[in-house]
Image: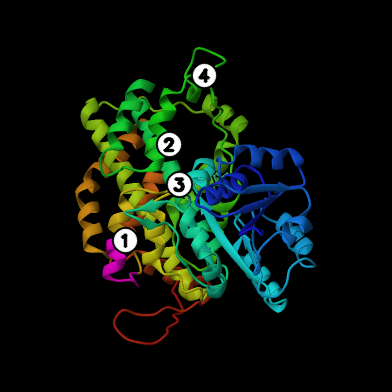
Amino acid sequence: SLYDFGMIGLGVMGRNLLLNMADHGFSVIGFDKDATKNAALESAATAGTTVKGVAELATMIQLLQRPRRVMMLVPAGQPVDDVIASLLPLLEPGDVIIDGGNSHYTDTLRRVKYLREKQLHFMGIGVSGGEMGARTGPAIMPGGDKEAYEKVRPMLEAVAAKVKGEPCVAYLGKEGAGHYVKMVHNGIEYGIMQLISEAYALLQQAGLDNDQLHKIFDSWNKGPLQSFLVEITADIFLQKDDKTDKRLVDVISDKAGSKGTGKWTSQDAMDLPVAIPVIDTAVALRTLSGYKEERVQAAALYEAPAARINTPADTWIQQVHDALYFGTIMSYAQGLAMLRKASDELKMEIPLPQVVKVWRGGCIIRSVLLETFANAYVQSPDLPNILLNKEVAAMVQPIETNTRTAIAQAAQAGVPVAGIMAALSYFDAYRTERMPTNLVQAQRDYFGAHTYQRIDMPGTFHTVWEQH
Ligand code: 6PG
């Protein structure tokens, strides 16, 4: 008998997603050139499920039901094109190819068009949740061909995380929308991770140790900051190192890695354009973390401010909590505003209410906040920015003062909190009716005759500016 679904690439994500599918009653087959991975797949299968691993792509394709439904989970870039090239002679019109990796959406667009000519469906699907998520319920962000989505919908709905009985998967737009939404998800992820690291630095300044940090993040995870990232942060502080008698977090190098999705988010935001300074800052600070040798030199060259954070611990913890909460809301606001803009500009028709609903479970940025955002979009699906929603405003307003106080203290003590600062400055600019950019316009007209508009009459003007 033939198999329901095929997977190309049996690394951590591919294997776990396939096993998850098998657990939900689908018969699945995986292909990897590496025979040990095929064996690993079969031996990890739950008893009574139908799971097979093969080392020949053609064998897998022959063993699939028509129309064939195959997903690849291989590194983004050339490997995806290589897989497509090897599939072409084996598939027939109507078959569905899914790319479940972190591909750039422009590559996905190109592949959708190329394969459409060959009468094959190609879908870019974002999958979030890491190894555990893939095995037990990820968030799934499909985009592309609606017809193709219907063919794989039962499988995706079965394996996705569930929130209040609803699967964390929905059709999220045309063409490259799935990978676009995943890219922005990762941008928000970068933003929140940067903000959490700043909260960590601020709490450490007040002399709190890892056990206390664990307790603080654990208690935060029981309140409005409840989220996957805050939850794992609490765990991290307790992890013992197996090589020394220290906590693991204290012996990890501060050079942060990245695979590109955060950078892509910033690059694309600039092109749209849309302002996402919290995400930009997060990308920049990961980059700066890599300049270790220079930072060591600068640390020796510049004396740190003498000022210390002297707020009583309980008050300080609340202020840092509010600053993190404030920043987190801004990170989501910027990412979602980006999706709104991209949906129109790139003609992807991304349904924002569905995006936030999908993000409520399974993914790295899942949090209780998304429930509020989901309500905001139910009220007005075309909301340009969640900060314009009354419920969101009611959340932001009470934590504003503490955010300002935390930033002021951080600045005095010389603790870098660029992410939280970017969040506050973004907010202050966004809620400003008249920005000082009238002066920028005057300067542009002064040196470049770039013209300007007036506030009191229509038209475009240029002035021959007097030198004094
Ligand atoms: C997810 C993650 C996942 C991966 C990122 C990490 O949603 O499950 O975002 O896709 O962990 O690629 O990205 P960096 O290596 O760039 O931090």
Which residue, given by chain and number where applicable, does mark 4 sit on?
Answer: 241
Nearest to the observer: residue 426 or residue 398: 398
Q: Secondary structure at mark 4?
A: loop
Residue in view at x 73 percent, y 54 percent: 79
C-alpha distance separating marks 2 and 4: 20 Å
In this rendering, which labeled residue sits more in front, label 1 or label 2? 1
Q: Position of residue 294 (x, y in %)?
A: 60, 32
Q: Amino acid at mark 2?
A: Ser
Q: Position of residue 364 (x, y in %)?
A: 45, 46
Nearest to the observer: residue 113 or residue 423: 113
C-alpha distance separating marks 4 and 1: 40 Å
Asked whether residue 382 is drawn in magenta, I would say yes
Q: Return the mark for residue 197.
A: 2
Q: Return the mark for residue 374.
A: 1
Q: Residues within 10 Å of mark 4 (few under 14, many from 20)?
A: some
Image check: 348 left or right of 416? right
Which residue, given by chain and number where applicable, does mark 3 sit on?
Answer: 364
In this rendering, which labeled residue sits more in front, label 3 or label 2? 3
Going from N to C along the chain, the mark reached first, 3 or 2, is 2
Residue in view at x 41 percent, y 62 percent: 355
Task: Indicate the quadrant where residue 209 lies.
Answer: top left
C-alpha distance separating marks 3 and 1: 17 Å
Q: Which residues are magenta?
A: 375-383
